[in-house]
Amino acid sequence: MNIQHLRYFLAVMDTGSISRAAELSGVTQPTLSLALKRLEREFGTPLFGADGRGIRPLPAAAALDARVRPAVRALAQARHDLNPAVPAAPRIGVLQSLAEGWLHRLIGSWDGPVRITEGLAAELEQALVDGSLDLALGIPPESKQLSSKAVAREPFMLFVGPSHPLAGRETVTLNELDGQPFVLRQCCERLGTARRLLKEANAKLDIVAKARQEATAAALVAEGVGATLAPRSWQRAPLHALKVVDLDLERTIAVCWKDRRMAAAATSLQRKLSARIPKP
């Protein structure tokens, strides 16, 4: 069995697309499609089915993913254990507000074991500066000692629970937020800017809860305690997201690093993460 074919398979599972997986893997679509067919022959079962103009994973693909992904990482770790010249697992920081939605993409984008540290933006930036992290997935750093490459930009949305009066709508204005019960996400990296924009719009929120953990904020919103503002990728069941039509606020997600020797790895990670973002 060709391990590279298994990597192609994992790329398709991560991107949901033959074309994007081929781009991510640096091969042509026919090459990748042929590799998938060979895997299907080896395992004796179809892995993907047609879904309009694309493909969808069948139950056998999900079962194979669960077994192949840790095996591929274990092989990469074995290479390092047997040959010290192979680089060790990198130390990668992840912004706290990104962790839940982006960890799967991050780990799937790195061919081998990684060591993950979660933190706030300032904490990750300091860890990069002092050398205790090699890379970070967060927001563009303020320090001139650090470099970064943008992965994605996403707008802030208003998130409400299923029983909230705004749950059936697609959009809301800033004026309509005036007096709304609000759950404050204290780890939000754009908190200061959001407060300024709301003040300029004369929208005064009624802060009924403050949460340091994203899971706590989401649970409070889901229970109908209040609404919250968060980047689009913060979406999770059973919350409903509304576009705030007159709120000019977005977040840039970036791969950051300090050591020049990490530049190539950072660029590769940025490219792979970008390919794993679902198309609108």
Image (cartoon, rainbow, N blue to C red):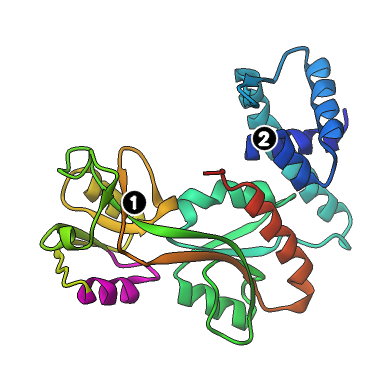
Q: Is residue 199 magenta?
A: yes
Which quarter of the figure has residue 37? top right
Is residue 15 visible to us here?
A: yes
Is 135 displayed left or right of 192 in the figure?
A: right
Secondary structure mostly seen in magenta is: helix
Residue 269 location (% of width, % of height): 69, 58
Task: Examine the rendered structure and indicate whether residue 206 appears above or below residue 1.
Answer: below
Is residue 208 visible to us here?
A: no
- The residue tagged with tag 2: helix, strand or loop? loop
Q: Earlier in the sequence, mark 2 or mark 1?
A: 2
Q: Residue at x 68, y 39 (%)?
A: 70
Task: Examine the rendered structure and indicate whether residue 130 appears above or below residue 86.
Answer: below
Is 226 displayed left or right of 122 in the figure?
A: left
Which quarter of the figure has residue 191? bottom left
Which range is magenta?
A: 185-200
Residue tagged 2: 17
Numbered badge on residue 190: none
Residue tagged 1: 215
Is 197 displayed left or right of 14 in the figure?
A: left
